[in-house]
């Protein structure tokens, strides 16, 4: 077992994340790790990189999105749903097409088995979500943003708040 100071490790993870590097490739000084933690990590074999994202379970994500209302306010729709899905596609290009299809499925209301009013009705920007989905998707996916991005964890958090239970792939 690796003897690592957890507070030190999390500070290092946050520092590595801010520098857009993985903890495995960052040096101790960049991540502000104590010498003891840096030594323990350097001696570890096959130590999992806590910054790297796990594979995406599309069915679990579909299940979580199904409990979330697509006729939500524009900020929630753009940032916390489309942004999160698009950011996941940026991180996992192998899932990009499936994530985009899921964004369409959720935004249109298909996941909830009823048409979303905002899918075809113009919002405050004068355009329906159907018309701006691709633009919104690309804006999040390709933007040179350097801060913290919204992740799928936000989708799962909101789904749990709405009563969804993990593992309930309906």
Image (spheres, helix red, strand yellow):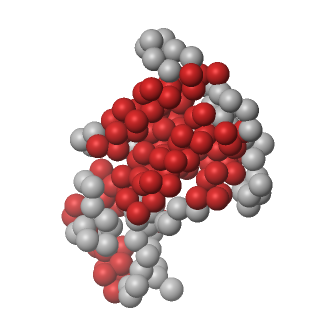
- Left or right side of 115 for 96: left
Q: Total of numbered circles in the picture?
A: 0
- Left or right side of 149 for 1: right
- Toward which corner of the image does residue 117 lie, by quadrant? top right
- Left or right side of 147 for 30: left
- Foreground pick, 154 / 25: 154
- Left or right side of 23 for 118: right
Residue at point 41%, 47% (across, down): 87
Percent across and percent down for residue 103 are: 53, 42
Residue at point 56%, 47% (across, down): 102
- Foreground pick, 132 / 34: 132
Kindly tell me whether residue 15 is visible in this rendering.
no
Q: Quadrant of the C terminus?
A: bottom right
- Foreground pick, 80 / 132: 132
Percent across and percent down for residue 155 are: 58, 44
- Toward which corner of the image does residue 131 lie, by quadrant? top left
Residue at point 78%, 42% (across, down): 163
Kindly tell me whether residue 3 is visible in this rendering.
yes
- Foreground pick, 47 / 97: 97
Q: Is residue 25 above or below residue 85?
A: below
Percent across and percent down for residue 20 are: 27, 55
Q: Is residue 127 above or below residue 36?
A: above
Percent across and percent down for residue 100 are: 47, 47
- Toward which corner of the image does residue 94 lie, by quadrant? bottom left
């Amino acid at each position: 077992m690796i003897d690592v100071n957890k507070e030190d490790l999390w500070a290092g993870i946050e520092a590595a994340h801010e520098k857009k590097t993985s903890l495995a490739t960052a040096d101790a000084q960049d991540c502000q790790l104590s010498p003891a933690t840096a030594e323990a990590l350097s001696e570890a074999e096959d130590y999992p990189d806590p910054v790297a994202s796990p594979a995406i379970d599309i069915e679990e994500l579909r299940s979580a999105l199904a409990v979330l209302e697509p006729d939500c306010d524009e900020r929630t729709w753009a940032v916390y749903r489309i942004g999160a899905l698009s950011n996941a596609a940026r991180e996992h290009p192998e899932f990009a097409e499936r994530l985009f299809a899921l964004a369409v499925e959720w935004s249109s209301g298909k996941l909830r088995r009823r048409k979303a009013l905002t899918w075809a009705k113009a919002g405050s920007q004068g355009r329906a979500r159907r018309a701006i989905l691709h633009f919104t998707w690309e804006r999040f996916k390709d933007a040179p943003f350097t801060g913290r991005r919204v992740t799928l964890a936000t989708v799962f958090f909101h789904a749990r708040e709405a009563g969804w239970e993990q593992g309930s792939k309906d």
